[in-house]
Image: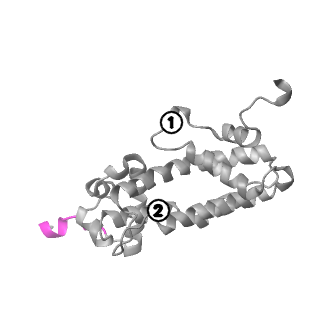
């Protein structure tokens, strides 16, 4: 006869520390985009399937957890790699439209996460006084995005009226301006609209006036 103790289901083996950490981060990212700073550690623990206390054995506090999730999403090397894989044979307008479509979703996520970081005071380095401006990893992500776009526009230098770096800055302004969390998202620009405005502007052509 099987004893009660032997019939009891075995506990799943504990995950290695780094794997557990990444599992938590992966669960946090979509929740953070959806809920922002209102996201609770109870909701996070429920999504991961662990006790709330487990979170704090991996991360010092909620701010540290949100910061780690943001750093995972805002990986400058990943951004540069994605942009470097854009088809080099595309015409300029098709390239801009393709890149804009690729970036719009991630920019929306980034904006939501940056608002959550600000709301939770997660942007302050643990043990260090809060300073104005974004954390260093956010600056690095912006720089990586700027570098990748500048390199892309550099391929089309002969077709541009401005330097590639300026074209990259203008595109970033359109991308981020279109995805501000407090704006009416029914008016959000599409990739094609961003390409049209960036390359031809909004005014009627001179010969048509």
Which residue does the numbered mark 2 point to in the structure image?
A: 133
Sequence-earlier tag: 2 or 1: 2
Q: Report x, y in % for residue 41.
A: 28, 58
Visible residue check, residue 85 = no
Classify residue 112 as left or right of residue 140.
left
**Could you tell me which quadrant the N terminus lies in?**
bottom left
Q: Residue furthest top?
A: 209
Between 18 and 91, the one nearer to me in the picture: 91
Q: Specify start and end residues of the magenta stretch as a single range.
A: 4-12
Q: Which one is nearer the viewer's eye here, 13 or 107?
A: 107
Callout 2 secondary element: loop
Query: Toward which corner of the image does residue 66 lie, by quadrant?
Result: bottom left
Viewer-closest of 150 and 31: 150
Indicate the quadrant where residue 64 lies: bottom left
At a point 69% along the width and 54% down the height, the residue shown is 168
Query: Is any part of residue 129 visible from this angle?
Result: yes
Residue at image position (65%, 41%) is 191
x, y percent for residue 57: 28, 72
Residue at left 62%, top 59%? 145
Q: Residue at x 83, y 55 (%)?
A: 157
What residue would you read off at disc 1?
185
- Check residue 41 for magenta coloring: no
Horizontal and vertical percent for residue 135? 46, 66
**Disc sitting over residue 114 in the figure:** none
Q: Is residue 5 magenta?
A: yes
């Amino acid at each position: 006869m099987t004893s009660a103790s032997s019939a009891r289901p075995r506990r799943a083996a504990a995950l290695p520390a780094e794997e557990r950490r990444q599992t938590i981060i992966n669960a946090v990212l979509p929740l953070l985009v959806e809920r922002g700073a209102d996201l609770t550690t109870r909701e996070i623990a429920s999504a991961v399937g662990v006790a709330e206390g487990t979170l704090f054995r991996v991360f010092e506090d909620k701010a540290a957890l949100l910061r780690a999730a943001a750093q995972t999403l805002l990986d400058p090397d990943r951004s540069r790699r994605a942009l470097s894989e854009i088809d080099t044979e595309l015409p300029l307008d098709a390239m801009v439209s393709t890149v804009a479509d690729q970036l719009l979703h991630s920019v929306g996520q980034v904006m939501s996460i940056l608002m959550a970081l600000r709301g939770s005071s997660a942007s302050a380095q643990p043990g260090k006084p809060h300073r104005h401006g974004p954390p260093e990893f956010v600056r690095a992500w912006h720089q990586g995005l700027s570098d990748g776009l500048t390199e892309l526009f550099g391929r089309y230098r002969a077709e541009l009226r401005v330097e590639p770096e300026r074209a990259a800055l203008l595109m970033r302004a359109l991308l981020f301006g279109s995805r501000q969390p407090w704006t009416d998202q029914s008016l959000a620009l599409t990739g094609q609209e961003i390409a049209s405005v960036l390359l031809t502007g909004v005014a009627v052509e001179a010969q048509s006036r």
